[in-house]
Amino acid sequence: MARRALCLIVNPSAGRGRAERLLPAVEAALRARSLPFRVARTDSLDHARELARETLDRGEIAVGMGGDGLLGAIAGELRGTDGVLGVLPGGRGNDFARKLGIGTDPELACEVLFAGREHTIDVADAGGRTYLGIASAGIDSDVQHIALATRVPLGAMIYVYATLRALGNWRHARWEVVVDGERHAYVGYAAAVANSGMYGGGMRFAPQAELDDGLLDVVLTRACSKPRFLLTLPKVFKGTHVDSPDITFLRAREVEIHVDRPFPVYADGDPIAALPVTIKVVPRALKVLVP
């Protein structure tokens, strides 16, 4: 059972308004369990960070209800403290909730706030910014840009749609990725550094990634034909792409990414850094409620 009062930090626009629409049912579910809570709506990640710091001062559990970017912003304020993160999936992808075994229904996730246990996990730091899922650049940057700009209500399938569009104009980049001091140079699509291993609404991009092993999973996607790249895409949802000769999987505590042209680095659905960037694991830094 939750040991403290809850503060629901809600992004009303998450999931094209999904969080706001489902909030009344969540409030009813919390009242049914006699959980004390208050609701704080936020309109920016900076405001969410401010609210997260406020929960620390008040001794509350900070419950993020929105997308993975909101959760990453809250986690950045809670990491290394006695603060606890609760998760109510309210965005499009909800990949962190999937990884924790919470699922994608925020009303059902209220049971985790009631009866869940605290578990301490790793977070990743990209140039001073905290993230929970996967930081990536390259064609993934183009995909995220298209997904964020698209107004078509496709749900999690927006990432498949955006990938198809991004691929049309793609040209390969030259990468240099330094993994715990070991240099990897290649031509290809992308470089990614995973904490949770999931992104894009259920894609198991780094299926071996664990949240509490003190390591980051590095995924390097090398050059291949566009048709071959497309044939690999469906396999990512099941994690069966690991046998592809075009993809290299590594593990590390620290990763440097360099590339021959500018890409924004996206993580948890939001731009968090520019290249070059150094990404480090912060082991056992965050307490989170899990089933």
Image: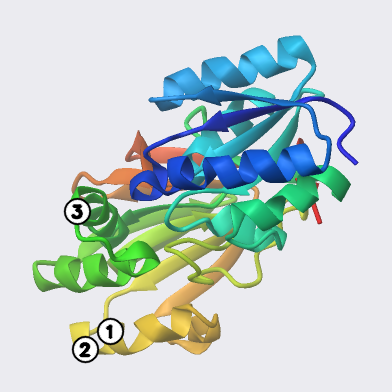
Q: Amino acid at mark 3?
A: Arg
Distance between mark 1 and mark 3 Cα atoms: 23 Å
- The quarter in which the N terminus is drawn is top right
Determine the residue positioned at 47% across, 44% down: 19
Q: Tag on residue 227?
A: 2
Badge 3 element:
loop
Name the amino acid type tagged 2: Pro
The residues tagged by marks 2 and 1 sit, at their Cα atoms, a distance apart of 5 Å
Q: Quadrant of the C terminus?
A: bottom right
Residue shown at 66% from the left, 35% from the top? 63
Q: Would residue 269 be found to the left or right of residue 53 on screen?
A: left
Mark 1 or mark 3: whose residue is earlier in sequence: 3
Residue topped by disc 3 = 151
Q: Are marks 2 and 1 in contact (CB under 8 Å)?
A: yes
**Which residue is tagged 1?**
230
Q: Is residue 123 above or below residue 60?
A: below
Query: Can residue 206 be seen from the camera position used here?
Result: yes
Judged from the image, the secondary structure of the residue bearing numbered disc 1 is: helix
Which circle's residue, 3 or 2, is located before the other in the chain?
A: 3
Residue 71 drawn at (x, y percent): 56, 39
